[in-house]
Amino acid sequence: MVHQETQLFEDEPALIRCLPQLNDLRLAGELTDLSIELDCIFAIGGRAEDASFSTVDKFDTKKRRWVELAPLYRERFNHSAVSVQVGRERVICVFGGWTRNYEEEYLKTCELYSPREDR
């Protein structure tokens, strides 16, 4: 089921836009890693044609709206993300992937994101 505000595009290559408020058209095959945490879905990074994104967007399933959050330190796509408990807080760890500005570069780094602190 597609949310009534979600716009889905099918083309070669397949494209998807999460919601009109996000203003980013991303390749579906390299959309991002989606992480589900605390009744929210996080869309992290991604790629469109010749650029990669550092954006982090959160969909609050209770309020039914998207919010743009603090960006990643590095633009990345084809990465992995996982939500883990660290002490009393759940954080999102983003691993590896690629970045693309003028040419593609493999990333050997990890970023830790705190939804509570938005950083």
Image: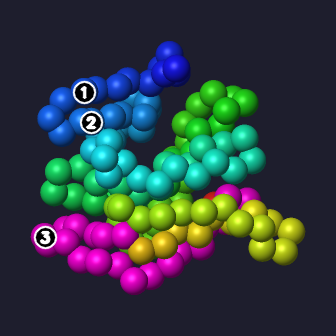
- The residue pinned by badge 3 equals 102
Quadrant for the C terminus, please: bottom right
* Label 1 residue SS: loop
Q: Which of label 1 and label 3 is nearer to you?
A: 1
**Residue 117 visible in the shown view:** no
Three-letter amino acid code of the residue under disc 3: Tyr
Q: Secondary structure at mark 3?
A: loop
Q: Tell me which corner region of the image, top left, top right, bottom left or bottom right, holds residue 39.
A: top right
Q: Which residues are magenta?
A: 97-117
Q: Is residue 51 left or right of residue 96?
A: left
Inter-mark Cα distance, 2 to 1 = 6 Å
Query: Is residue 64 shown to the viewer in this render?
Result: yes
Query: What separation in Å lies between label 3 and label 2 (alpha carbons)?
Result: 22 Å
Type of amino acid at the residue the image marks with label 2:
Leu
Q: Which is nearer the N-term, disc 3 or disc 2?
A: 2
Nearest to the eye among marks 3 and 2: give it: 2
Residue at screen point 60% across, 63% down: 82
Please tell me how crowded label 3 is: few (under 14), some (14-19), or many (20+) other residues with Cα within 10 Å. Answer: few
| 2 and 1 marks in contact (CB < 8 Å) | yes
User: Mark 1 near mark 3, Cβ–Cβ under 8 Å?
Assistant: no
In the rendering, which numbered label is found on residue 10?
Answer: 1
Determine which of the numbered discs, if any, sits on residue 15 in the image: 2
Question: Helix, strand or loop at disc 2?
Answer: strand
Location of residue 7 in the rendering, given as x and y in whole percent from the top left corner: 38, 24
Give the left or right position of residue 103, taking residue 98 as reference: left
Q: First in sequence, mark 1 or 3: give its number.
A: 1
Q: Between residue 23 and residue 59, name the one nearer to us.
A: 59
Q: Is residue 38 magenta?
A: no
Q: Write the residue at 67% across / 33% down.
A: 61
Crowding near the residue tagged with mark 1, few <14, some 14–19, many ≥20 C-alpha atoms within 10 Å: few
Q: Residue furthest bottom?
A: 108
> In the figure, is residue 82 to the left or right of 78?
right
